[in-house]
Image (cartoon, rainbow, N blue to C red):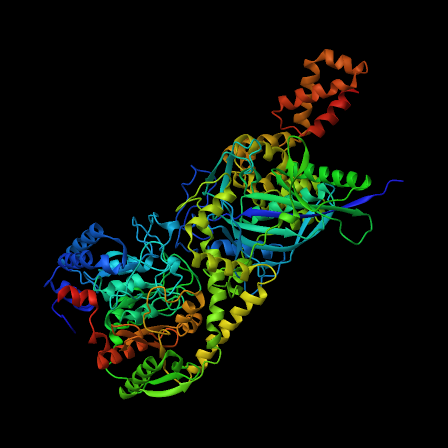
């Protein structure tokens, strides 16, 4: 890949190998990364908090562990953590005024496992407030720009982590995906955006948006790095009752070179023509590349997937309306004082939450209220079951499903002003979330959007049956290596900074 | 003529379960402590924290359900009950809505005269307790009008069992008897300390009245803030009287929540039905459904002891013990078991009752050691009763022996042997004591012969004393009266 000798350019796998071998120290890697962050992040805006001191301390700790003979799978790897995951003694904001100054008193399990594996946290990254959005524009605390075109959004809600990894401000970014919040920014930022099976990675310490859908996963520049991150984080956590207690098959060992013997399903109902001729053609080329790598392309049907969006926008708001109740000004976070407790609640929440969060709390409160519960929440749960069954049926005739990761390439700021057009960005990712399936986006080509000047990346979404992460990552690795789409363009902030 | 009303009462109890840790986190489940010292991110509802259910609490629920003959469904789940309150950390309570851990069941209880009663349960479900607020500056301790409030979350997340009865109780006396049976059962199952004074048992009563014989229920009120069985009794009596007076004066009962005022001895309106919440229950997505429960049911079934009401029924019906004494005997599981064992060995239930509730209870109270844990083993008490029955010892000696056994343990038969305490029935020996007593007390003898027959008791006492209590008292009296005649 490009700039192979530059420490900030190297993959997590390369860094860990070198740090373990002693050819470079974690401290050197981290100093280089921090210097780069300090140079470019004012333009990118990936981070809400940059952890200079904590990163240096942690790097020294990793170096000490390596010197004492430990071999760490992610030794010295710079990590960007989405700011809805707790890191002890660190500000954790969820991109919201209501938690703007909240210091987490504990560390999320997934983050703790990454640190245990040798990662060094560089900072906490921007996101749509409480992970609600697809562009990062819903953050109350900052603007994050797409490193490939600073006039465009990085995607969301894990846009900060995506921008950080794309701009080489970290090697691995942690994101959370509820309806596409890892995969869509992955696609927008030319990255692997990987959402494992629901329950594979502990949610303990991930500030909930929609508990039955939220799943942590990595954003990386290579599939191998995604596999390493997955291997470090996956597995049962006694602190999360929804985390799955079954053995994890390491994914990093399952990376493959071709797709021979794999049946890949193309979804009959997913019409890519509406994405415009350039994008449509790009996906056709991507499917042809899968075939060229030896895959059998088969048509599968997901007749209820079209109801995904409607289903999701009942279940997720319903859960969020309850999950976000705790931000009430009583124990932590913002409090706007008033004469009585009821008025304090109202003023605190009115001032603390942004409009998209309020919209979803209102939708969810309505969907759960007496007299509407059966018509909305219960029916949505039934639809969710049907969507999951459609996938089961489809996977009887294929091993993986391929489709777009987002409804367009990265768009310009303020381009999606009505909520529905923003929700439509996740049209292709929501059904997998509802079914709890593992899915990822992998770079599959470039288009220059109408009105744009820079070529922007497109993401191919691959989806596997429950727990088939090794198969999914293995196939994505073969595709990535054979096509090398990701390395055809460098992000502006990197090429510009180095020109 | 005056019409006569029937009260219809349903009782809702909240019972804190006895577990080492809280319902959804590892914090200790203990009463009291410095405020906010038994807390963690989970029970404080910190962002990102998740609940993990306590298996012991679930087993306690199944234990209670089985004890009351409830159905334990194969599948149960937790739901969220959404409402804002400052002492509820997440602003929703994890509870159970439409699929509780137990359904139905019956509480059997008894009245003072021994009458058995039943009251069906609607359900028992599991939830988490809230924190505790104290409101300052409002005068009445309520949040409205207070200057500020303090919240202690030590109690937040303690496992709480909610036990709802059908409206099948018809008086304050019955309500208290129901609660007493419920309390005893839960205590003896080991699922709770059920201490009203520590809040591990709290109850509300739904009270309505209707004309005798009417089929339809009257409008009910819910009575809260009752802090003892005595206040339950008073509050229900007072509410029945209030409703009766209201109806008789042509008024209407309003469906509302009323608070019991212990000092003024009356209930007062707290909030009316119109202010009722929409709790927006839905299945808690942080918790997976509980299934199947069959394994737990099997495990738990074996650990259920004989229940207090069953024992009460057996002690009164089979042993002929009076209801008051039977109630005392079943008050502690271990005591009832002890009692049962001695009866089994002696077949003398009334005599065992007398010892257990008499001398042994006194000794237990004085020493603070429960009878069942004392040095007086059931076998030893049985032996003592057998010695008494065989007239080997008399009751005075038995009493002394019991004191000794309480202090030192041991077999009463060996004590009788080693201390030479066997009762003397040798006429020659006793005659000597009688003669000596008559000779030593000429004035008393003269009084007796002059018609003061009650002084004979004094002479019997002197004779018993001279024999170190070993003389057979019946024989002593017999011989004495003959000689005085």
Is residue B131 placed above or below A258 in the rendered structure?
Answer: above
Q: Residue at x 39, y 71 (%)?
A: A425
Classify the position of the C terminus of chain A by image quarter. bottom left
- Using the rendered image of the protein, determine whether residue B52 is visible from the camera's viewpoint: no
Left or right: B94, with B308 as reference point: left
Residue A452 location, x and y as percent? 28, 72
Image quadrant in which you'd find residue B482: top right
Farthest top residue?
A: B443
Where is residue A477 drawn, in percent x and y? 25, 77
Question: Residue A461's spot in the image, x, y percent?
Answer: 34, 76
In the picture, measured across the screen, residue B219 lies left or right of residue B227, that is: right
In-front residue for pair B136/B73: B136
Say which residue appears at 16% left-offset and 74% top-offset.
Answer: A1
Q: Nearer the viewer, residue B211 or A89?
A: A89
Residue A103 place in picture, x, y as percent? 33, 48
Of residues A124 and A54, the one drawn nearer to the viewer in this rendering: A124
Question: B290 or A147, which lies in front?
Answer: A147
Quadrant of the image occupied by residue A393: bottom left
Q: Residue at x 38, y 59 (%)?
A: A138
């Amino acid at each position: 890949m490009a700039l192979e000798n530059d420490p900030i350019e190297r993959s997590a796998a390369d860094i860990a190998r070198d740090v373990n071998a002693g050819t470079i120290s974690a401290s050197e890697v981290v100093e280089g990364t921090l210097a780069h962050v300090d140079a470019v992040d004012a333009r990118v805006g990936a981070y809400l908090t940059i952890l200079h001191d904590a990163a240096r301390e942690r790097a020294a700790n990793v170096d000490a562990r390596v010197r004492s003979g430990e071999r760490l799978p992610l030794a010295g790897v710079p990590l960007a953590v989405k700011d809805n995951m707790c890191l002890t003694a660190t500000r954790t904001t969820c991109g919201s005024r209501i938690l703007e100054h909240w210091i987490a008193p504990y560390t999320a399990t997934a983050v703790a496992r990454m640190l245990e594996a040798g990662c060094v946290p560089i900072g906490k990254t921007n996101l749509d407030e409480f992970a609600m959005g697809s562009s990062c524009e819903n953050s109350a605390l900052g603007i994050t720009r797409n490193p490939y075109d600073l006039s465009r959004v990085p995607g969301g809600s894990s846009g900060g982590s995506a921008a950080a990894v794309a701009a080489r401000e970290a090697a691995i970014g942690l994101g959370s995906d509820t309806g596409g919040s890892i995969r869509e920014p992955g696609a927008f930022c030319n990255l692997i955006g990987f959402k494992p099976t629901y329950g594979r990675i502990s949610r303990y310490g991930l500030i909930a948006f929609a508990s039955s859908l939220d799943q942590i996963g990595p954003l990386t520049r290579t599939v191998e790095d995604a596999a390493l991150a997955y291997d470090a984080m996956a597995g049962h956590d006694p602190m999360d009752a929804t985390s799955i207690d079954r053995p994890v098959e390491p994914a990093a060992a399952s990376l493959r070179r071709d797709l021979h013997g794999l049946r890949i399903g193309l979804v009959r109902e997913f019409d890519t023509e509406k994405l415009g001729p350039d994008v449509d053609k790009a996906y056709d080329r991507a499917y042809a590349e899968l075939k060229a790598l030896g895959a059998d392309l088969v048509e599968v049907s997901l007749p209820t997937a079209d109801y995904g969006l409607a289903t999701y926008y009942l279940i997720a708001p319903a859960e969020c309306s309850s999950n976000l109740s705790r931000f009430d000004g009583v124990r932590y976070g913002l409090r706007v004082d008033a004469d009585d407790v009821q008025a304090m609640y109202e003023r605190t929440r009115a001032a603390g939450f942004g409009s998209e969060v309020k919209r979803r709390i209102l939708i969810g409160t309505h969907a759960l209220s007496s007299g509407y519960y059966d018509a909305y929440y219960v029916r949505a749960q039934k639809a969710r079951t049907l969507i999951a069954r459609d996938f089961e049926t489809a996977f009887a005739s294929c091993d993986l499903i391929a489709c777009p990761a987002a409804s367009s390439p990265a768009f310009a700021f303020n381009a999606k002003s009505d909520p529905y057009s923003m929700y439509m960005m996740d049209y292709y990712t929501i059904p997998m979330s509802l079914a709890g399936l593992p899915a990822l986006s992998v770079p599959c080509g470039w288009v220059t959007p109408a009105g744009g000047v820079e070529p922007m990346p497109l993401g191919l979404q691959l989806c596997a049956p429950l727990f088939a992460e090794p198969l999914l990552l293995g196939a994505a690795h073969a595709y990535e290596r054979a096509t090398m789409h990701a390395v055809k363009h460098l992000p502006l902030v990197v090429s510009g900074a180095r020109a | 003529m005056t019409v006569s009303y029937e009260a219809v009462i349903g009782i809702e109890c909240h019972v804190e379960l006895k577990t080492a840790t809280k319902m959804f986190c590892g914090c200790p489940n203990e009463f009291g402590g410095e405020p906010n010292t038994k807390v963690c991110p989970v029970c404080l509802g910190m962002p990102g924290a998740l609940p993990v259910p306590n298996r012991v609490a679930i087993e306690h629920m199944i234990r209670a359900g089985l004890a009351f003959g409830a159905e334990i469904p194969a599948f149960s789940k937790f739901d969220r009950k959404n409402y804002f309150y400052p002492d509820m950390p997440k602003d929703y309570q994890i509870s159970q809505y439409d699929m509780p851990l137990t359904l139905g069941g019956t509480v059997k209880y008894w009245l003072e005269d021994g009458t058995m009663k039943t009251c069906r349960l609607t359900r028992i479900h599991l939830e988490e307790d809230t924190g505790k607020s104290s409101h300052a500056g409002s005068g009445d301790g309520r949040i409205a009008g207070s200057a500020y409030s303090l919240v202690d979350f030590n109690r937040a997340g303690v496992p709480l069992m909610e036990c709802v009865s059908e409206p099948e109780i018809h008086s304050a006396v019955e309500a208290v008897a129901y609660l007493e049976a419920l309390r005893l059962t839960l205590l003896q199952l080991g699922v709770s300390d059920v201490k009203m004074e520590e809040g591990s048992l709290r109850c509300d009563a739904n009270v309505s009245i209707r004309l005798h014989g009417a089929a339809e229920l009257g409008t009910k009120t819910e009575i809260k803030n009752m802090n003892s069985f005595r206040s339950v009794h008073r509050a229900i009596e007072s509410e029945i009287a209030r409703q009766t007076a209201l109806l008789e004066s042509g008024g209407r009962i309003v469906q509302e929540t009323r608070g019991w005022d212990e000092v003024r001895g009356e209930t007062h309106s707290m909030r009316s039905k119109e202010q009722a919440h929409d709790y927006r229950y839905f299945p808690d997505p942080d918790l997976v459904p509980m299934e199947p429960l069959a394994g737990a049911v099997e495990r738990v079934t074996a650990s259920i002891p004989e229940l207090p009401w069953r024992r009460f029924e057996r002690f009164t019906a089979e042993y002929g013990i009076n209801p008051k004494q039977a109630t005392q005997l079943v008050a502690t599981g271990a005591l009832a078991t002890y009692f049962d064992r001695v009866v089994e060995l002696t077949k003398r239930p009334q005599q065992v009752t007398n010892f257990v509730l008499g001398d042994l209870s006194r000794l237990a109270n004085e020493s603070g050691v429960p009878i069942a844990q004392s040095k007086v083993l059931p076998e030893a008490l049985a032996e003592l009763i057998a010695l008494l029955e065989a007239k080997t010892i008399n009751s005075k000696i038995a009493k002394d022996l019991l004191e000794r056994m309480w202090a030192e343990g041991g077999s009463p038969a060996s004590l009788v042997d080693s201390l030479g305490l066997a009762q003397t029935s040798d006429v020659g020996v006793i005659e000597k004591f009688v003669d000596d007593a008559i000779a030593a007390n000429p004035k008393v003898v003269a009084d007796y012969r002059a018609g003061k027959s009650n002084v004979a008791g004094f002479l019997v006492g002197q004779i018993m004393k001279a024999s170190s209590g070993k003389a057979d008292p019946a024989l002593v009296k017999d011989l004495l009266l003959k000689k005085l005649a």
